[in-house]
Amino acid sequence: MLNRRTLRIKIMQSIFAYEQCKEADYELAIDHIEEFFQPDLNSMKIQDKELLKGQRAVAIKEFEKRFKGQAVKENPDPRIAQAVEEALSLEAAYLKKDFDYFRKNSISDVEKINTFYFAVLNLIPALATVAATDKKVSAKNLISNPIVEALRDHAQLKRETLRAGSNWDERMELVRGWFRDCVRGDKEFQQYCESLSPTLETHHAFVKHLIRKIILGPTLINSHFEEWDLRWSEDHDIVKSLAEKTLKSFDEKTKAIEIQKLSLEWDDDKDFIERLFSGAVRLDPRYHELIASNTKNWEVDRLPLTDRVILQMAIAEMITFQNIPVKVTINEYIELAKHYSTPKSRQFINGILDVIAKELVKEGKIKKSGRGLLDNR
């Protein structure tokens, strides 16, 4: 099941990618100016390369100043003015496109977890189908496993699979290879096949083993999911939890099995993602100055990008979400720093956020309601 930490991780990854794109967008704008003042090889006129070189240098300097928000006098050279305006417009257009993409990507990255969850569930009956045609084993226990049958015939799973594209029908050769290399030689599978009258407990235990040790264990199957999902290191445990809860939901009397919901309050989770992403990316410049003033005169741009993203997200969360205690926010971002940044970042983030939180509370920028929501000690 989803939790807020998972959402924060997804948002952090999207913001990190967005910040890298910002640098690329800036360079594309510079490239536009460079290209603008290249000699026109198709022109019949003699090209003054020194003049073009000088115009290019002036235009780049003016662009850099205006990009930083500095005042610049209107350039009397219309070509320089045109090049700078075009570069600024180009950078802004790229930036908006990237913002929209990564804001949506934060949500789609979470929704993709369902794709892998359904793929794991569908792989269980797919392996049973392959086992039925294998001449080296007698897999009648797996084929008649009531949990396997429930998954194979589950109407909702079929609908969700069609929507998510999590079917193995077009990849059965891959499944056959996995059965041969990962399942057929497995000792527990062999013991399960040899059982003359398997009980529901026996059937249940093997499917649990199949999920934990074979599909999501250190096998070729898990490696395939790693290649399929760039975020598999974070998604793996969520998919495993969803699959195991599905297994536990099997009802012996009705032979029904329940497909789990990734989120019980998806509308609230989407709102959290969108507001936190937008709040962190569009954080008011005065908060960047607040970070800088508390980092021993380090400019914000000189901080490691991961630390900068974590600090921006933490501040955005503290000033945006009234129902999240300051202490919870700080602890969550300390954990992110611990797992995703440098060894010293955890202590650094802890110290900076503690000081910033107190300053924001004092200035009235953090407005929490409810007992304990302001305690960040």
Image: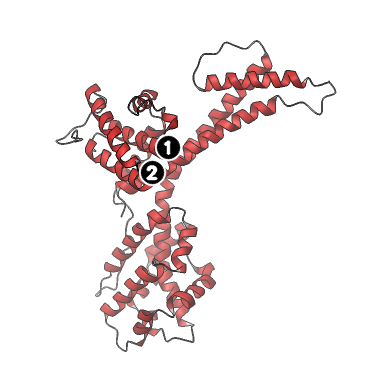
Residue closest to the eye, 358 or 190: 358
Residue 218 is drawn in which quadrant? Answer: bottom left
Q: Between marks 2 and 1, how big is the CA–CA gap? A: 9 Å
Neighbour tally class for label 2: few under 14, some 14-19, many 20 plus, Cα within 10 Å? few
Taking the spot 35% from the left edge, 48% from the top edge, the residue there is 339
Earlier along the polypeptide chain: callout 2 or callout 1?
Answer: 1
Taking the spot 28% from the left edge, 29% from the top edge, the residue there is 356
Q: Position of residue 122 (x, y in %)?
A: 42, 67
Asked if residue 325 shows in the view, the reply is no
Q: Secondary structure at mark 2?
A: loop
Residue closest to the eye, 207 or 62: 62
Instruction: Say whether residue 344 is left or right of residue 127.
Output: left
Cβ atoms at labels 2 and 1 below 8 Å apart: yes
For label 2, the residue is 342
Above or below 342: residue 235: below
Q: Position of residue 44 (x, y in %)?
A: 85, 23
Q: Position of residue 141 (x, y in %)?
A: 36, 83
Residue 43 is drawn in which quadrant? Answer: top right
For label 1, the residue is 304
Q: Secondary structure at mark 1?
A: loop
* Quadrant into which the N terminus falls: bottom left
Taking the spot 51% from the left edge, 74% from the top edge, the residue there is 177
Taking the spot 41% from the left edge, 40% from the top edge, the residue there is 306
Residue closest to the eye, 67 or 61: 61
